[in-house]
Amino acid sequence: MNKLFRVVANIYNAIKTGGGNPQSPQYWLQKLFGRNVTVTGIEMDEDTALRYSAVWAAVNIIAGAVGFLPIIAYKQSGKSKERIKHPVMKLMHSRPNPYMDAFTFKEVLQAHVLGYGNGYAEIERDGAGRPIALWPLLPNKTEPIIENKQLVYRVYQPDKTVILPYDSVLHIKGLGFDGLKGYSVIQYAAENLALGVAAEKNAAAFFGNDSSPTGILTTDDPLKKETKEVVEKDWEEKHKGLDKRYRIAVLHSGLKWMQVGISAKDSQLIESRKFSVNDVARWFTIPPHMLGDLERATFSNIEHQGLEFVMWTLMKWLKRWELECTHKLFSTAEQEDYYLEFLVDALLRGDTKSRNESYRIALGGNNNPAYMTVNEVREKENLAAVPGGDELFMPSYGGGGKSNSKFSALLNTAWQRITHKEINAARKALKKPEQFLQWVNDFYNKHKDFIVAIIKPILEAKQAGDAEAIASSHIEGRKIELKEAFESGTVESLLQEWETNNLGGCNE
């Protein structure tokens, strides 16, 4: 009955909305029955698309990345945050339900989003309204609807239709028009994907039906129908298929061979299949090399392309997960201070040498003020904390007493001026994000002279250090911080941290 109702509803909506080509059978098949028959004649749906290797790879890579990344619960305290233990963490970090681990759950829901445009999970709650389990729902059997001016979810089950309230469904959605439901990439990309599938079928047919040497058999004498059938059958048996290629052909009955075949390259099978892989990469916003197309990948740019994948592909999906899970899994009161966030540091880390150099500067290398503690560094490397590892290193400049207090005050004021200039310049540069990384290099190459001019007289008066070395160390640390923050989309948070830690009440 439900199926009949939905068919009738589709017919009504098709007539009501109009559009398309009323004469096109593809148009009516898609409107009435949800079938997407492409111009190639291939019916393209989510299952068919996943059989195409490039689509499988794209979905597998993105869904797998979302699945394995840990998601952490934090409590916001002013401008700082701390990890917390919360029952929600069991659902998102361990087991969302008795039959599924967190990796599988996140991977399944993300695969649903990539295939159907939406991933749904029912939130099971206890008597106090706290979430205790998450159950994935079939995306093609679930839809958000407005009913009595309320957003609810209609779930089609084999024997009935269930209406779930808004706060009982975790809904991860892709790009959409109304904000309530995401578009299916596969449905929108149907024609492009069908070309790729058609190219694969064409290649398979090319080799499967190959009867090399290719061409036609001719004769000056007319052949009876029975004779033609015997010749044709004999030729197919001896030459059709890959394992029978290059056999010697023995001609009889006055038959002559005429070459008319073309090569696989001439038929552009290889080129068309390459293009199809790049097409899939564009639809899913994924670097082509991750789908196996290494034509434009080099040793020097492969790491940068990997970072671009995190920045421009993964981050948007992770943010959708973070916002939806925080909103639906924490109570209204908890949302004031608690939130969920994916830990992506492992994907953004460079090689061991680069990380160690970054940590050296962060810990106060070259007698520069540190901006990370030993335990913070150890946490990033998944190492246990050590006693005494929570203290920030601060350089000592000369003797003590009143003279030293005056020296420290002068030096602090100098660093406030330096930091103030850096923050203002960085915020201005953020207005042109495509040029930000180049700005970092250009700005700090010139900024060194400004730093030295300010701190050198203070240091020389106390004979407290080398202004050039301190400026160089500071600049290298800032460049690393800004580049890493830009790659993770947290530049503004970093600038706010600088304001809190360095500026104080400075108003230049």
Image: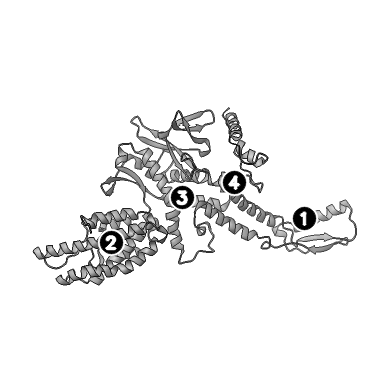
Determine which residue is flagged by label 1. Answer: 236
Q: Quadrant of residue 260?
A: bottom right
Tell whether label 2 touches label 3 (CB within 8 Å): no
- Mark nearest the camera among 3 and 1 is 3
At label 1, the amino acid type is Glu
Q: Name the residue at 55% across, 57% down.
A: 278
Query: How far separated are the C-alphas under marks 4 and 1?
Result: 31 Å
At label 3, the amino acid type is Gly
At label 4, the amino acid type is Thr
Which mark is first along the chain, 4 or 3?
4
SS state under label 2: helix
Q: Position of residue 5 (x, y in %)?
A: 58, 29
Determine which residue is flagged by label 2. Answer: 421
Determine which residue is flagged by label 3. Answer: 64
Q: Name the residue at 64% across, 38% down.
A: 28
Q: Name the residue at 61% across, 43% down.
A: 36
Q: Residue furthest right?
A: 221
